[in-house]
């Protein structure tokens, strides 16, 4: 008789006289085994990824392929890319994969310099280590000319967007 130790779980292995695995007798209950596996997966960061991947697969399965998605507007392409860059920077990879699948965003990320050029953003070297969205938010928070507020002008909404569903701001 010999002992095989697994993380958080002691298991006794019985072998035959020829050294072959004969039977496995666990000293732990199924509940303890589930707890040990869950704890190990959580500590490795795998459990969250599995849950997010499962959500992405559920969204994909529920996505009605017969229902045509409106074409991805240029503005939505840029906005989605800003969000994807932010999500990936913060290690929300599976959330980013759901965004990509649901929005119709291209699988390959847009080149950062292309994105910056489209947004008319100039960056210094220190800014390139964080997502563009951080710089944009910082710029908005630190500038403004209307009582410390940034004046937003109307933008073009994607085709098929109902303007009555747009929530008005506090000044309207």
Image: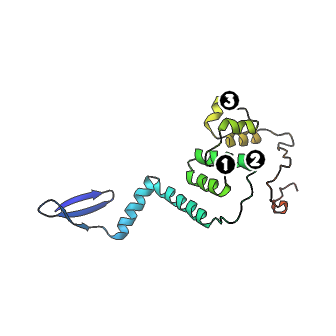
Q: Of 115 and 38, which appears nearest the observer? A: 115
Callout 1 secondary element: helix
Q: How far across and how far down the image is residue 146, in percent?
A: 87, 42
Callout 3 secondary element: loop
Could you classify mark 2 by the number of other residues whose Cα lies within 10 Å: few (under 14), some (14-19), or many (20 or more)?
few
User: In the rendered image of this protein, does residue 125 appear above or below residue 37?
Assistant: above
Picture residue at 56% right of the left edge, 54% below the top: 94
Compared across the picture, whether 14 is left or right of 76 comes to left
Q: How far across and how far down the image is residue 123, in percent?
A: 69, 32
Could you classify mark 3 by the number of other residues whose Cα lies within 10 Å: few (under 14), some (14-19), or many (20 or more)?
few
Per the model, the C-alpha gap separating discs 2 and 3 is: 25 Å
Tell me the tag on residue 74.
Answer: 2
Tell me the tag on residue 124.
Answer: 3
Q: How far across and how far down the image is residue 49, in percent?
A: 51, 55
Picture residue at 24% right of the left edge, 58% below the top: 4
Q: Of 129 and 76, which appears nearest the observer? A: 76
Choose the circle earlier in sequence order: 2 or 3.
Answer: 2
Per the model, the C-alpha gap separating discs 3 and 1 is: 21 Å
Residue that sits furthest to the left in the current view = 17
Picture residue at 79% right of the left edge, 54% below the top: 158
Per the model, the C-alpha gap separating discs 2 and 1 is: 14 Å
Compared across the picture, whether 171 is left or right of 137 comes to right
Q: Which residue is mark 1?
A: 83
Tell me the tag on residue 35.
Answer: none
Choose the circle earlier in sequence order: 2 or 1.
Answer: 2
User: In the rendered image of this protein, does residue 123 appear above or below residue 18?
Assistant: above
């Amino acid at each position: 008789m010999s002992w095989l130790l697994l993380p958080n779980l002691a298991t006794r292995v019985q072998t035959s006289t020829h050294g072959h695995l004969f039977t496995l007798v666990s000293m732990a209950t199924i509940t303890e085994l589930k707890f040990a596996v869950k704890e190990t997966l959580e500590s490795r960061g795998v459990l969250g990824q599995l849950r997010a991947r499962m959500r992405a697969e559920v969204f994909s399965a529920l996505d009605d392929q017969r229902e045509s998605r409106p074409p991805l507007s240029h503005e939505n392409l840029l906005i989605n890319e800003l969000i994807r860059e932010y999500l990936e920077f913060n290690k929300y990879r599976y959330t980013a994969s759901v965004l990509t699948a649901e929005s119709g965003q291209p699988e390959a990320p847009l080149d950062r310099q292309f994105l910056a050029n489209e947004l008319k953003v100039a960056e210094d070297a220190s800014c390139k280590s964080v997502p563009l969205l951080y710089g944009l938010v910082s710029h908005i928070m630190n500038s403004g000319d209307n009582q410390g507020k940034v004046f937003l002008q109307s933008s073009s909404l994607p085709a098929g967007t109902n303007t009555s569903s747009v929530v008005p701001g506090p000044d309207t």
